[in-house]
Image: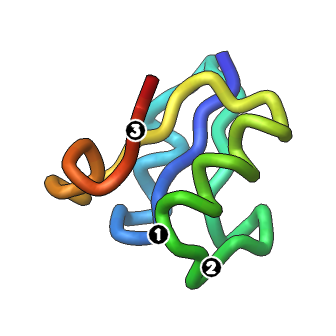
Amino acid sequence: MKVLLDENLPRKLKFRLAPHEVFTVREMGWTGQKNGRLLKLMHKSGFQLLITADENLSFQQNLA
């Protein structure tokens, strides 16, 4: 599974999620992107899961 870790999480978490293919927002060069843009970039790049600590994401974006 291709997983993206949001920039509000510790990067070390990446190594706890093996054997999944895990990238950080920083590694992808997407630091500072707004949630809507981040979700679009994520989708275009084939990510299947976003792990974030942003509790308001579901209220700010249409996740369907």
Element under disc 3: loop
Secondary element type, mark 2: loop
**Residue reaching furthest to the left:** 55
**Looking at the rendering, in which quadrant would you find the N terminus?**
top right
Element at label 1: loop
**What residue is rendered at 20% in x and 49% in y?**
59
Please state the horizontal and vertical placement of residue 18, each as a whole percent of the image: 57, 25
Is residue 53 among the parts visible in the rendering?
Answer: no
Name which quarter of the figure residue 4 lies in: top right
Q: CA distance from mark 2 to mark 3?
A: 21 Å
42 versus 8 height, above or below: above
User: Which residue is under mark 1?
Assistant: 7
Q: Which mark is residue 47?
A: none
Asked if labels 2 and 1 touch by Cβ distance under 8 angstroms, the answer is: yes
Q: Which mark is drawn over residue 31?
A: 2
**Amino acid type, mark 2:** Thr
Q: Earlier in the sequence, mark 1 or mark 2?
A: 1
Depicted 11 relative to depicted 14: above or below = below
Q: Which mark is residue 62?
A: 3
